[in-house]
Amino acid sequence: MSSPAIDDSTYRRTESHISLLTLVLGAIAAIPVAYFYGWRWGVGLFIGAALAWLNFRWLKQGVDALADASTAQADAKKASVPVATYFKALFRYGLIGLVVYVIFKYLNVPVLSMVLGLCALGAATLVVSVHSIFRSAE
């Protein structure tokens, strides 16, 4: 029994918008923060947004790999998933934490600014979601 093919172009476009908007919002927010609080805070905010973007990309790649493996092995009794997929899923947060620590330790960028920059992904997702809701109402 096979399921009908799903047109995923809308989902791919939404993922692309979230990805791009994460970096754009991080850059836009970093400029006034750098002006009012100093360049280290602005750099930290942008670094956090860049890490959020990287996290989103890795998450997307992991989900895509799992989806591909599940559809390719739909008739198999026991599906296997590439080890690299598990590695990316488990260690992406550890790598982000390590990068934040190294930047904090050696560049003296405030950790709070990087953590706030990580929120750019949530802000981008919210903006794209609200835009999609208003667009579908038209």
Image (cartoon, grey):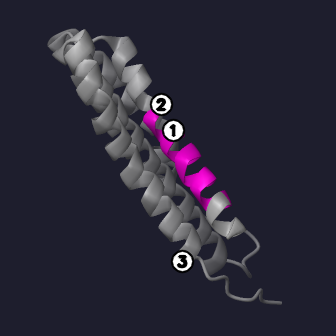
Instruction: Classify the position of the N terminus by image quarter.
Output: bottom right
Closer to the camera in the image, 15 or 79: 15
Q: Which stretch is magenta?
A: 120-133
Query: Residue 125: percent from the left, percent from the top?
Result: 54, 47
2 and 1 marks in contact (CB < 8 Å) = yes
Q: Is 84 on the left-hand or right-hand side of 129?
A: left
Q: Any magenta on residue 123?
A: yes
**In the image, what residue occupies the spot 49% across and 56% down?**
60
Closer to the camera in the image, 104 or 1: 104
Q: Residues within 10 Å of mark 3 (few under 14, many from 20)?
A: few
Instruction: Classify the position of the C terminus by image quarter.
Output: bottom right
Gap in angstroms between the C-alphas marked 1 and 3: 22 Å
The amino acid sitting under disc 2 is: Cys
Q: Is residue 91 above or below residue 35?
A: below
Residue labelled with disc 3? 9
Residue labelled with disc 1? 123
Gap in angstroms between the C-alphas marked 2 and 3: 26 Å
